[in-house]
Image (cartoon, rainbow, N blue to C red):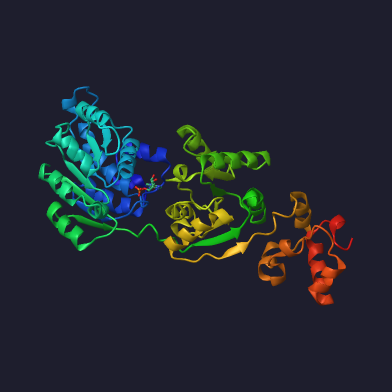
């Protein structure tokens, strides 16, 4: 299904296209049609499922008729009120509404605590159609008469369960009591407790029910591979993987903008076709990098989590976590970029000792123990030696199966020939012979132990 099949207007389709989304997520597919029809909706969907767009897009469409460029505040009353539990979420929803509504002249603002109130009052007095708010700060504005609700047509309760957990119910009840009863109400909640159901029964009218898979469900079609790598050897490890696994298109995640920039730059210096996308790059630069990556002109796209949100690349076979994300949910987002639509994919993580703690958090979240494998001894072998060794070694598949080759680069690349006393310690002659044979496979002739 395409976004255009959902009946969205060209302005919204254009904004969606600019975001690089190719198809609606399940919650968008299920929630957008009833909202467009004017129905109340009760949706069980968490952050990460695309839920913000699922209510923002149809809401913008239904409010489009009110869009105007007048400077008069009276022409911009609050039409939609979105209540959210935290300032981060409120800011994020505001940003989404601006992004999706960029071709429709409706005003958007958010109000939340912890920041000066005066600029918020000024924004409210100037007039705003879509207001995103945390309940406590909104009540402050109501008290100071900075905001009126007579024209509200939409109420969205985002992360309703979290708002209840945070003790906002009395505030929400007070706010709802001030809204016009004839309105469209949308309730989004990660979980449905009895209390949420009861409140939904009071606040919503004959709601359409929408449910989608929880965000922490990682797709079964993705294989997770975890390599233990010294942090200084990660780039070499990546280069090695690119070559060994014949990666033609790979999305590589770094935790920081600086890290992503540095990695892309160094890969480019190694004559590898890499580009970086992160929030310091302009939207145009990001779009270009993404387009080139999709077309196959760029082989390695190095991204941060923020920039990669919403990236949808068809048939992406590999995702590499150059850094394990500090927020475990990002792991789910990252690997969700591969193995889409039933296709198989592989998520490879390079784990240094400092990443271990993050890996444990990921395992806890996805309820899966990930086996940590040794990376072929990149830390020890100089790249040139590896090149030579590569031409003579057996193919990658046999390495995986044959236990002799399981850690070949670790055991078989001594920097110097073993002294005789060591040979004794190794045990039988057969074992020694085996070692030499293995070494011979991986070392250039000049550095063979027996040369
Ligand atoms: P949300 O669940 O609203 O927090 O959205 C999670 C992320 O998914 C956001 O970064 C959105 O930009 C992104 N997103 C929303 N809709 C889509 C889509 N149809 N395709 C790809 N990414 C999307």
x, y (%) of residue 345? 52, 58
x, y (%) of residue 312? 45, 48
Count of labels shown? 0
x, y (%) of residue 328? 44, 55
Q: Nearer the viewer, residue 365 or 210?
A: 365
The answer to whether 89 appears left or right of 224 in the picture is left
The answer to whether 256 appears left or right of 100 in the picture is right
Q: Is residue 433 visible?
A: no
Q: Examine the rendered structure and indicate whether residue 325 appears above or below residue 136.
A: below
Q: Examine the rendered structure and indicate whether residue 397 appears above or below residue 290.
A: below
At x 74% / y 50%, what residue is drawn?
A: 383
Q: Is residue 306 visible?
A: yes
Residue at far front of view? 421
x, y (%) of residue 116? 28, 32
At x 32% / y 40%, what residue is drawn?
A: 91
At x 27% / y 34%, what residue is drawn?
A: 109
């Amino acid at each position: 299904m395409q976004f255009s099949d959902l009946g969205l207007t060209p302005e919204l389709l254009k904004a969606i296209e600019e975001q690089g989304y190719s198809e609606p997520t399940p919650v968008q597919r299920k929630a957008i049609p009833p909202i467009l029809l004017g129905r109340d909706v009760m949706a069980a969907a968490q952050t990460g499922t695309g839920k913000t767009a699922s209510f923002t897009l149809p809401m913008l469409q239904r409010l489009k008729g009110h869009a105007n460029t007048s400077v008069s505040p009276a022409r911009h009353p609050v039409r939609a009120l979105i209540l959210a539990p935290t300032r981060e979420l409120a800011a994020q929803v505001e940003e989404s509404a601006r992004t999706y509504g960029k071709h429709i002249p409706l005003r958007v603002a958010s109000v939340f605590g912890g920041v000066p109130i005066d600029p918020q009052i000024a924004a409210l007095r100037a007039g705003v159609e879509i207001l995103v708010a945390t309940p406590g700060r909104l009540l402050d504005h109501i008290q100071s008469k900075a905001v009126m609700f007579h024209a509200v047509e939409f109420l969205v309760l985002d992360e309703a369960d979290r708002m209840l957990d945070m003790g906002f119910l009395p505030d929400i009840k007070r706010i709802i009591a001030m809204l016009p009863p004839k309105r469209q109400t949308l309730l989004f909640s990660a979980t449905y407790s009895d209390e949420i159901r009861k409140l939904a029964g009071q606040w919503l009218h004959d709601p359409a029910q929408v449910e989608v898979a929880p965000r922490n469900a990682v797709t079964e079609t993705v294989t997770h591979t975890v390599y233990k790598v010294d942090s200084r050897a990660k780039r070499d490890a990546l280069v090695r993987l690119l070559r060994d696994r014949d990666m033609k298109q790979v999305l590589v995640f770094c935790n920081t903008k600086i890290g992503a920039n540095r990695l892309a730059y160094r890969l480019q210096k190694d004559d590898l076709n890499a580009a970086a996308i992160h929030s310091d790059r302009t939207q145009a630069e990001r779009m270009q990098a993404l387009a080139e990556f999709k077309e196959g002109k760029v082989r390695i796209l190095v991204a941060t989590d923020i920039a990669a949100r919403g990236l949808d690349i068809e048939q992406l076979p590999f995702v590499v976590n150059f850094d394990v994300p500090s927020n475990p949910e990002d792991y789910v987002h990252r690997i969700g970029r591969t193995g889409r639509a039933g296709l198989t994919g592989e998520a490879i993580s390079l784990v240094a000792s400092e990443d271990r703690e993050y890996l444990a958090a990921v395992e806890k979240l996805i309820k899966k123990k990930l086996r940590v494998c040794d990376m072929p001894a990149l830390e020890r072998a100089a790249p040139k030696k590896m090149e030579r060794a590569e031409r003579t070694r057996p193919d990658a598949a046999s390495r995986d199966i044959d236990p002799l080759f399981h850690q070949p680069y670790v055991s078989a690349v001594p920097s110097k020939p073993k002294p005789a006393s060591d040979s004794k310690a190794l045990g039988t002659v057969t074992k020694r012979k085996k070692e030499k044979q293995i070494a011979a496979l991986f070392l250039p002739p000049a550095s063979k132990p027996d040369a």
